[in-house]
Image (spheres, rainbow, N blue to C red):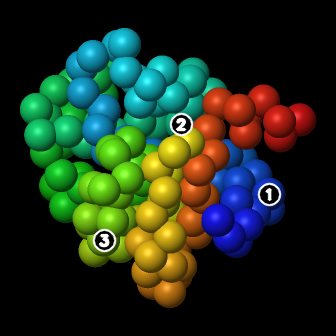
Amino acid sequence: MDDLFARQDVIRRLLNESRRWAFVGLGDNPDREVHTQARLLQERGKTVVPVHPSKATVLGEQGYASLGDVPGEIDVVGVYRRAEHAGAVVDEAIAAGAKAVWLPLDVIDEAAARRAQEAGLDVVMNRCPAVEWALRR
């Protein structure tokens, strides 16, 4: 995989400067990794937007069925779907005007990552926000 999708300057900027993260795949199941990651970032001051077909309220935040339904600006889209679905989510993030996409560990779609970069989005792929947060000190 190309290190272009794991640049430390981009990771630091997204963790330090972003304010609003839309987590695609964030439903009301607290046992899922997406829930853990969203809670961690919320505890560190980020606004979390759940994006899941159930539209459930999660971590006290209103859920939306799709990225296109989310009002306002999105700084980062966390793509918590299996790799075979990641490309479609990245395309939705581009269409929604997101500033960045973050594909967590083992969610790898290099073609989608390139499309996002070509559209002007920052891209992080195959990295865990919690691990990167701990490393940024």
User: Left or right of 16: which side holds 63?
Assistant: left
Q: Is residue 42 visible?
A: no
Q: Residue at x 45, y 64 (%)?
A: 109
Looking at the picture, which amino acid does disc 1 mark? Gln
> Is 17 above or below relative to 38?
below
Q: Is residue 9 visible?
A: yes
Foreground tag (1 vs 2): 1
Which residue appears farthest toward the right when viewing the image?
Answer: 137
Locate the C terminus by quadrant: top right
Looking at the picture, which amino acid does disc 3 mark? Asp
Q: Secondary structure at mark 1?
A: helix
Of residues 61 and 95, which is closer to you in this image?
A: 95
Which residue appears farthest toward the top when viewing the image?
Answer: 31
Q: Label 1 to label 3, Cα distance in Å? A: 24 Å
- Of the numbered discs 1 and 2, the one sitting upstream in the chain is 1
Looking at the picture, which amino acid does disc 2 mark? Lys
- Of the numbered discs 2 and 3, the one sitting upstream in the chain is 2
Label 2 sits on residue:
46
- Of the numbered discs 1 and 3, the one sitting upstream in the chain is 1
